[in-house]
Amino acid sequence: MNPRRFPFTREISLAVMAYLYVPVVVLIAYSFNANRTATIWTHASVSWYGRILENPSIQAAAWNSLVLAVCAATAATLLALLAALSTRRDFLGRGAAETVLNMPLILPEIVVAVATLLLFVALGVHLGLTAMMAAHTAFCIPFAYLPIRARLDGMSGTYEEAAQDLYASRFRTFRRVTMPMLWPGVMAGFTLAFVTSLDDFLTSFFLSGPGTTTLPVYIFSAIRSGISPEINAISAVMLVVSVLLVALSFFLGRLRR
Amino acid sequence: MTDASVPPAVSIRNVSKSFGKGIYTVPVLDDVSLNIDRREFFTLLGPSGCGKTTLLRLIAGFETANAGTIAIEGQDVTAAPPFHRPVNTVFQSYALFPHLTVEQNVAFALVEQGLAREAIRTRVGEALEMVRMGAFARRRPAELSGGQQQRVALARALAPRPRVLLLDEPLSALDLKLRKEMQLELKQLQAEAGITFLFVTHDQEEALTLSDRVAVMQAGKILQMGPPREIYERPTHRFVADFIGDINLLEGEALPGGGVRLGPGAVVPLTCATPGKVTIAIRPERARLATVGEGTLDATVIHSAYLGTAMLHKLGLPDGSTFLLRQSESSGPPPETGSRVGLTLPGEAIRVLLQ
Ligand SMILES: Nc1ncnc2c1ncn2[C@@H]1O[C@H](COP(=O)(O)OP(=O)(O)OP(=O)(O)O)[C@@H](O)[C@H]1O
Ligand SMILES: [Mg+2]
């Protein structure tokens, strides 16, 4: 045995893995259960996947979630990119600026969600997709910011000097050198923001108006009228989409290097 | 030396530069002036931290001077951004763009210059041929060895045909053998391309072999500037003499009536502007052995080493210091270790140094 290894490392890792993934595996398994009662196994079937495809409220909720995640992640990535570029050089208040940017990671989401709701109501903002986009963009910023910032920190300024030395103006330098070199970080940031928005329940729950339910909110309300295998199927689809996205951005990032 | 009607390739007038603010100010360049002629291979030589890179970055436009002016071929560029200066840089770290191929790296500046696609292809081909990297056009920088990256960096900087090429210790990352090879290639390239080279190094041997002229820097000042031979044979400062090659430094006293006294009874015939303490320098190959009592000084042979074509003797002087003497094979049999010898210091071989 390797003397530098702690005893039982393998056993503990296996236990942690089981702890993390058994619920997910059970959920996916039961999404293929033919029985209407979600907790009693009869035989395998994909009929619930067919059912969610036909259900118009699920379709609407999925579409809302997708539109919301794409818009919020795009806006958050753009803002995060600007923020990362402008906090590149040291200046007075740089630390404060970064803390403010990363605040959504620390603040309790329920507090922010309630506060946003109260503010929007006070301002007379119409609740719905637009309101959710604004709120989602805000809490997605740190998720997009951190990978971009990490990439930027690892990038020597010499490349940009070299570009300017080779007659590229500041804008051309940004387009031909800074941006392409930053791209993997931007991709990673976008994916993280996208998945975070897709997954969000609290903020969406408070800010969604009639007809603008997102998938997590739909699942929550559906589950109150009894657990059905349909919910297992939707959750499994969301899981697969998220994992695929993260994997895709990871591979794209590798390709660019 | 040059035609006064043609402005020099690079003209630096009274440039000073410091970093930081208030009490944290660090002066880095102190009133530097120099002219570099067209097609000259000019080298900045000095120890680490003396401000060589800073001077180069001022010329490239990455830093702004606190005072003074910089002109390139007669055109004032003191306030111009790097992309408006007709100079290119070979960076110490090469700084090849990792996301572009070798070909695209070399084409980078040509695209910015707005050349037609055909012209770009021809020029890139020529530049890569010049550094013998044609076969690697489609590779990424990460797939090249250090020497190959070095060549690509050179091709990339030469492709847009700059007026002046700035090279910041471009060979320091290479091993000794490759370094010697690249030195020769650089010199050849410079002659072929007909471009002014401003080269930075802290390696005195490299500076002497490659350059038409060398400027020796210390602590932000240029101490001496001239052809390698002059720097080697007639150093003006103690620092320059000490920095370049082997040399013997002797303390002496300039006498009011002329001559410098090195010890009791040992006077060399030199004239100094002001009497008082002076340091004199003499190269090991310029001193000669003599019979005891007939030289300038008497000395003891401490140690001798055979160098192939010559002998290097380490001599002990009466005041306890040591003296290196290089004796060529043709000048008679070498003295034995421990024996007493005379030491002749020919007046024309001695330099009186400034501190
Ligand atoms: N951006 C900067 N801020 C503060 N000090 C600096 C900066 N750049 C250089 N210096 C200081 O200026 C001095 C000269 O630096 P420079 O890089 O020009 O030296 P160098 O002669 O190129 O040395 P080396 O041979 O080690 O490359 C150093 O003392 C360095 O610490
Ligand atoms: Mg340097």
Image (spheres, rainbow, N blue to C red):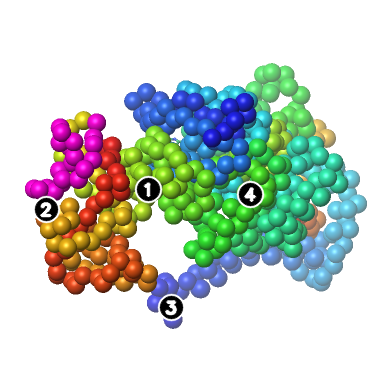
**Residue denoted by label 1:** B233
Which of the labelled discs sits on residue B319, or is there none? 2
Query: Judging from the image, what secondary structure is the residue with disc 4 in?
Result: helix
Label 4 – label 1 distance at C-alpha: 26 Å
Residue visible at 15% across and 54% down? Answer: B297
Dot 1: few (<14), some (14–19), or many (≥20) neighbours within 10 Å?
some
Query: Do marks 2 and 4 share a chain?
Result: yes
**At 55% from the left edge and 56% from the top edge, which residue is drawn?**
B183
Q: Position of residue A81 (x, y in %)?
A: 65, 37
Q: Earlier in the sequence, mark 1 or mark 2?
A: 1
Checking the image for residue B85, the label placed there is none
Instruction: Specify the quadrant of the image occupied by residue B49.
Output: top left
Residue A148: image quadrant is top right
Q: Please report, as a chain letter, where disc 1 is located.
A: B
Label 1 is placed on what type of residue? Glu
Do tags 2 and 3 sit on the same chain?
no
Residue density around tag 4, few if under 14, some if 14–19, many if 20 or more, within 10 Å: some
At which x and y percent is residue B116?
Answer: 85, 41
- The 10 Å Cα crowd at callout 3, few under 14, some 14 to 19, many 20 or more, is few
For label 4, being within 8 Å of ligand 2 is answered no
- For marks 2 and 3, give the one nearer the viewer: 2
The span from disc 2 to disc 4 (Cα, nearest Å) is 50 Å
Q: Secondary structure at mark 1?
A: helix
Marks 1, 2: nearer the viewer:
1
Range drawn in magenta:
B254-273
Q: Label 3 amino acid?
A: Asn
Is residue B122 shown in magenta?
no
Q: Are marks 2 and 4 in contact (CB under 8 Å)?
A: no
* Residue visible at 14% across and 62% down in the picture: B292
